[in-house]
Amino acid sequence: MTSLPIDILQTLADPYWRLYNLYRIMVKGDEGEQDLVVDFAPNRAQTELLDSLHGRDLVLKARQLGFTTLSAILWLDTALFTANMRCGIIAQDQGAAEVIFRDKVRYGYEHIGERLGLSPSGESWNEVLKRAMPLARDSASELLFDHNNSSIRVATSMRSGTIHRLHVSEYGKICAKYPDKAREVITGSIPAVPLDGIVIIESTAEGQDGDFYKKVQRALAAQQEGRELSRKDFRLHFFPWWAEPGYSLPDDAIPLVPITEKDRKYFAALEAKIGRELSAGQKAWYVATRESDFSGEDEKMWQEYPGTPEEAFQVSTEGVYYAEQLANARKGGRICRVPYVDVPVNTFWDVGRSDSTAIWFHQQLGPEHRFIRYHEDSGQTLGTYMKYLQDTGYVFGKHYLPHDAAHKRLSNSNKSIEEMLVDLGIPSSDIIIVDRISDEQVGIQQTRKAFPSCWFDEVGCAQGLQRLGGFKRAWNKTTGAWRNEPAENGCEHGADAFRQFGQALDTGQYRGSSGNSGAQKIKRRGSGMAA
């Protein structure tokens, strides 16, 4: 670098000039076309992020705004022009990592300065700059520079050593699809970045669960409260679809997109929230994108092209069995912090074999049915669930199991779930097998009737409430209508466990208790048995 002329060194000292003038990248061409080479320059959204970086930055965004590309070039530039820096990008999978490294990082370095043409000596600036900043190592995932000992790496995980600049791409999808990788990010990658380093975590939304969702909720709460952030706190940056100028159709295409009354209500509500009017082109683009890209699914559109941070994680209430009941519970303040009181705790179960087992923890206080905790796991033995019950320290009343818990299972013990739980320490007198019903829809209606007396602890039952909120009818793509049966989307286990309460209450099998008579702590008898 020191071999370059002074005036060039002064120009290169400006990082903004470098970002706008030095780099080229490969971008995916339209379907059937070759990939394109474009001159990189930060777009509107990327510039907004650059101007507001905090050091720990969380980006919730609409699709295709290029934040991973921004970090790829920004980290490359940092590694080229700052000594002893370790820069990394974590991609959601190996294929994505290879594309980012090949088309952004390596291509950006190999073609650095080409846009500037020839230097005063007649050489291309590309040759001059690469000679001044040569590679010491070029692997399939990392560039290490010989002139300053800095490097940039793209991989699916990053644990070793200090990382001064870290970008985590599509973290919501990592949390949903690769929980082990998400744990590595939490326990290994983020802690490896010093307080004076930079962490950028970006993603579209991916359900109401996982570390990305939790981080966004904490950062959003801090933003709404106007709380001052420490260097370890994440700042939320939200980039909605309506702020992107490209997300609008031209005037001649607008009449071709039918806008329904439902659409008009959505746009009116969104305009009220954001304090600005949407153009006819924006509305047409939104509807056309939803219909063509996501087969009309509102949830997918909210996830991939959110209008507000809350909408990004919103779950559609269409086809949801308990939508009205949950809405009324929220309006009535019955989803709140619910204290544990000195009365027996009852449990309501759905017991899986190779899939999930769900347990609701319940207390009755007068006419109120209070749900204080929810627990769900999969692939565990009954002994594991029994230990979980013991570790709560609760004094238990009755344990309500679905009808098939009384059926013997083909296993080493050839016993029913009921018999195995008795062997593990639950008195047989405390187990109630909820009667079988011939039609699941009857049980759902019985459960709806029970909702007005129910209170839910918003923390202890957070996952359970998500399961109830996601319990919906299956969609028939052929007929374009809801089927009268539940969808298999992972929410049915928590909903089935809660349905044991509704059925037991409606049929008189529920045995209420407001005192400690007959209640006891569970004593374990023997080893875990497979469910």
Image (cartoon, rainbow, N blue to C red):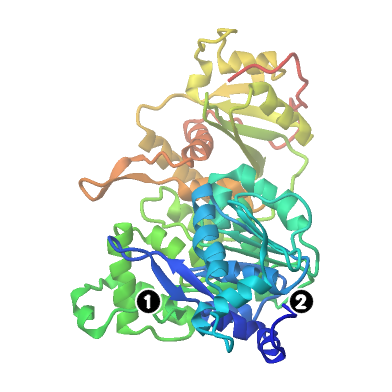
**2 or 1: tag closer to the N-terminus:** 2
Residue positioned most to the bottom: 7
Q: Residue at x 52, y 45 (%)?
A: 467
In terms of image quadrants, where is residue 145? bottom right
* Vertical side of 159 occupied by 330: above or below: below
Question: Mark 1 is on which residue type?
Answer: Tyr
Q: Residue at x 50, y 83 (%)?
A: 117
Residue 8 visible? The answer is: yes
* In the rendered image, the vertical position of residue 421 relative to residue 105, given as above or below: above
> Is the N terminus in the top left, top right, bottom left or bottom right quadrant?
bottom right
Q: Nearer the viewer, residue 362 or 119?
A: 119
Residue 302 at x, y percent in the picture: 43, 64
Residue 435: image location, x then y, percent: 47, 24
Give the amino acid type for the residue marked by disc 2 in the picture: Glu
**Residue nearer the viewer, 375 or 513:** 375
Please determine whether, in this image, residue 481 is positioned above or below residue 122. above
> Can residue 335 be seen in the rendering of this structure?
no
| Residue located 36% across and 37% down the image | 441
The residue tagged 1 is: 247
Q: Which image quadrant for residue 293? A: bottom left
Residue at the far front in the pictured view: 121
Locate the C terminus by quadrant. top right
| 470 to the left or right of 172 | left
Residue 120: where, in percent of width, then height?
58, 89
- Where's residue 500, x and y in %? 51, 33
Q: Under tag 2, what secondary structure?
A: loop
Q: Nearer the viewer, residue 366 or 120?
A: 120
Q: Determine whether 499 is above or below 132 in the image.
A: above
In the image: residue 125, left or right of residue 491: right
Residue at mark 2: 228
